[in-house]
Amino acid sequence: MVARVIAVDPFDLVVFGATGDLAQRKLLPGLFYRWQAGQMPPEARIVGVARRKLTDEMFRTLARDSIAAHVAPADRDATAEEGFISRLRYVAADADADGGWPELAAMLADAPDRIRVFYLATGPDLFGPICDRVAAHGLVSDKARVVVEKPIGKSLASAKAVNDAVGRSFPEDRIYRIDHYLGKETVQNLMALRFANALFEPVWNAAHIDHVQITVGETLGVEGRAGYYDTAGALRDMVQNHILQLLCLTAMEPPTSLSADAVRDEKLKVLKALVPIAAENTVRGQYRAGASAGGPVRGYLEELGDHDSHTETFVALKAEIANWRWAGVPFFLRSGKRLPSRVSEIVIAFRPIPHSVFDGTAGPINANTLVMRLQPDESVKLLLMVKDPGPGGMRLTEQALNMSFAEAFGVRNPDAYERLLMDVVRGNQTLFMRRDEVEAAWRWVDPILEAWAASGEAPKHYTAGTWGPSAAIALIERSGRTWHEDGV
Ligand code: BG6
């Protein structure tokens, strides 16, 4: 099966921070895939901007290298690659100086009516200064929009400052705040599952669901990002954005349509209904040396070279949503680095049957579980009780109705950035975070950070390659539940 491609209108995409990690690892390879698929019109231009003095040719060499490193050889067509490379330009400019900006303005002036995207693949401290210069040079045309990446602040106050700085130059309906989890295929499948099937909605509530688990596990450590990571930690890096977005899509009321504000209004209601979380319902951990991803690995403090850091590399929370649909249903959230496997999933654990008609020989009857696996191996799995085959007594066993997307569709799963970049060009904000959502998420997260800081306690240790500190297991088991393990 071949994925359907709908071409977008001609556009100019200006990538600030074009020589940086995000641009090289995700944006250029993602754009190349879209070009090769025929989604980008031939006149589209990608203008890299960064401080380094490079020629167009030098930037093109960087882009070739990034495609070679991040696109599988079997997915690369040499003619398409040269066509794509020919659409790249480069301008050296600095957010703090005048040089380069007139050149950028002159380049864009060739196509004043074209869709114009400014992608800020830089640190958030540069968002305001770059937007100010973009505006000062008259580049905010009617069709201009800006894309920003997390971290959007480190707290509610700093998030407001970042949002204000960008908002000086761009109105809210032209600001695209990326949370790349929203571009993942299974995350959108969550909406398809909930709202394109009549089956689930009647049972999607506290009367039928016992609890929900959201796990985003990584085997990686902090790699070359210790400088950033140590000022963030798992709560800011993963929960404030990705995990809360997954929670919102799982828990929100059905929106009236998939229009950007209809969906974002519903997500916002969930964020506002989150109950302030008590310290005993939080666990934070930090990995020590162990084994992960197939070999021995150093502990976080050794990687960092600072033995005083209290930054958490693992977090587990028991969250609650105070509304009619979810009152009394705990949402267990966890995320960490250096865990045993890279697995992200949403687990909906249904309530047990009210009464068993089977006798003791049937064996235990597990409650039904729906598992939406985001990565790896995107799938939706429903665990059901069935009869163990064969003659004899009625014995029960658990089996999975398993839909693996790779097997069902046999298409390459596009990277989240491919979809999100094209959505920006199309002007579709549904999968981007609105200002009030980001701020509501911080409003819930801030008190957790404050409570941790006030306690002065260090995070609990866990050995790299394990599922976090034992306190994370105790957190869920105290309420009589257990973390989902993939058994069938
Ligand atoms: C990023 C975090 O937002 O998401 C990283 O900053 C994390 O620390 C990454 O590794 C995980 O993304 P994915 O798509 O690999 O699950």
Image (cartoon, rainbow, N blue to C red):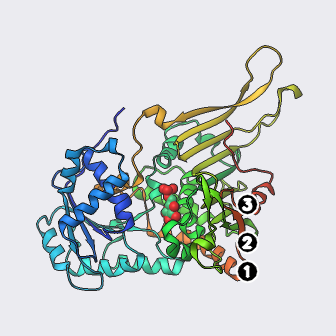
Are there few (<14), some (14-19), or many (20+) residues within 10 Å of tag 2? some
Q: Residue at x 48, y 60 (%)?
A: 265
* Residue identified by numbered label 2: 279
The mark lying in front, picked from 2 and 3, is 3
Q: Is residue 93 left or right of residue 124?
A: left
The quarter of the image holding the N terminus is: top left
Q: Residue furthest top?
A: 391
> In what element is the residue under mark 3?
helix
Amino acid identity at mark 2: Ala
Most foreground residue, 256 or 350: 350
Where is residue 117, by image quadrant?
Answer: bottom left
Q: Separation of disc 2 and disc 1 at Cα? A: 9 Å
Q: Residue 472, which numbered label? A: 3
Residue at position x 79%, y 54% from top?
Answer: 477
Between the C-alphas of marks 3 and 1, the distance is 18 Å
Q: Secondary structure at mark 1?
A: helix
The image quadrant of residue 273 is bottom right
Q: Are marks 2 and 1 in contact (CB under 8 Å)?
A: yes
Q: Is residue 418 left or right of residue 359?
A: left
Task: From the image, tell me which residue sits under label 1.
Answer: 455
Query: In this rendering, does residue 357 appear at all?
Result: no
